[in-house]
Amino acid sequence: MNRNFLAALTNAALVLASVVAAFLIVELVARVWYGNFRLVNFPKTEASLLKRGFPAQFSTHLGYRPRPGVYTDTPWKTTATIGDHGVRLHGAAAPAVSPTVLAVGDSFTFGSDVGDGDSWPARLQAASGLNVINGGVFGYGIDQAILRGERLAAVFAPDAVILGFIADDVQRAELSVMYGVAKPVFTIGEGGLERLNPVLDPVPQPAHWLARFTRDVFGYSIFLHHRFKQFFPQFWMSGMSSVRVHGHGVEVACALLQKFAAIAGPGKVLLVQYEQGEIAAPERPPPVMALLACVAALDVEVVDLYLALKEVYATDRAVFDAFYDRHMSARGNAFVAAELAKAETLRSLTAKR
């Protein structure tokens, strides 16, 4: 009896050791594959943007917006100075008497990875003498940027509004949760554009206790993290990452552009920006092509940087590479500002100074 028990126990231990050894081998291969050997809880590294050192605060209307203050320890390792209404300041006084331009958009507009005076809104103000308000927000989709544009236009009564976007912003319009924070999400219903979540909750997906326990125990395995995220994303990342509601980002973005065009009073400019790798492609990303077709029917001036960046890419690769530092560098933002200054909407305002 004892001998049989010991034999069974030995066999069970061997099986367990074999399973553990096999798992460790798989884990090692996965870490080599992903190039990540950190001993961290991987799902927690993708936690809410509001908990990761970003200068942001929750908003029931937009999901989040920049929080006023001076931040020297940002995720971008640059100083970010946020003023009233969550707009980024330039570090220089606004022109005393000058037309006002409101800029809204994502991290490319906000100026992630550069200091206060090197975002393209700051560079545009310095070059044109216009009073340019930087209402860009890191991580925003085109839906959030347009909603923010409506609100800030009511506050600042600008003479022109510039909406900057990249292709990925259109795909963000398909999400109800982004970076672990609830965000506005629209769909196209029988009556046209419909918002599915008029009031947002600061905890978009309260994690079930089983999800929390599973993440706490198995989250240190990069192999299990990616497999759970692939096959059980809503369970594994509940309350922490992104939730896609539909796949109609282009249709929603086109409808939202009509809201942008309808902002009362000012001239409208659509600024199309590009991530570094997109310029090497033979043509613009499909979401950009689709939105350019939509905006053609609206009273909105378009500044599309694709051809200008493509020319620099073809003629001087070193200069082109210097335009980017994940986002646009200070030099890249100066280039963007120079291209924007050619827009008829802005040239007419500059002439009024």
Image: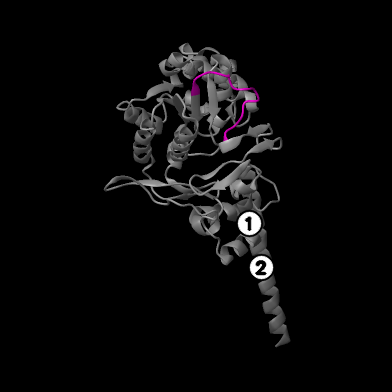
Q: Seen in the image, is 279 located left or right of residue 14?
A: left
Name the residue type under label 2. Answer: Leu
Examine the rendered structure and indicate whether residue 288 appears above or below residue 239: above
Say whether marks 2 and 1 touch (CB < 8 Å).
Answer: no
Q: Secondary structure at mark 2?
A: helix
Question: At x 52% / y 34%, what residue is drawn?
Answer: 106
Q: Is residue 94 on the magenta stretch?
A: yes
Q: CA distance from mark 2 to mark 1?
A: 20 Å
**Residue that mark 2 sits on:** 16
User: Residue at the front extreme?
Assistant: 97
Question: At x 34% / y 28%, what residue is drawn?
Answer: 295
Is residue 351 or residue 134 the one in the foreground? 351
Q: How many marks?
A: 2
Is residue 285 or residue 81 the one in the foreground? 81
Residue 182 position within the rendered picture, expressed as x and y whole percent measured from the top left: 50, 50
Is residue 329 or residue 37 the one in the foreground? 329
Residue 95 position within the rendered picture, expressed as x and y whole percent measured from the top left: 58, 19
Picture disc at residue 100: none
Name the residue type under label 1. Answer: Gly
Q: Secondary structure at mark 1?
A: loop
Q: Residue 264 falls in which quadrant of the image? A: top left
Find the magenta span and give its range: 86-100
Question: At x 48% / y 46%, what residue is drawn?
Answer: 61
User: Residue at the left extreme?
Assistant: 190
Report the mark closest to the observer, 2 or 1: 1
**Residue that mark 1 sits on:** 219
Magenta span: chief secondary structure: loop
| Quarter of the rendering occupied by the N terminus | bottom right
Q: Badge 1: few (under 14), some or many (20 or more) residues near its Cα, within 10 Å?
A: many
Q: Residue 88 falls in which quadrant of the image? A: top right
Residue 216 position within the rendered picture, expressed as x and y whole percent measured from the top left: 65, 60
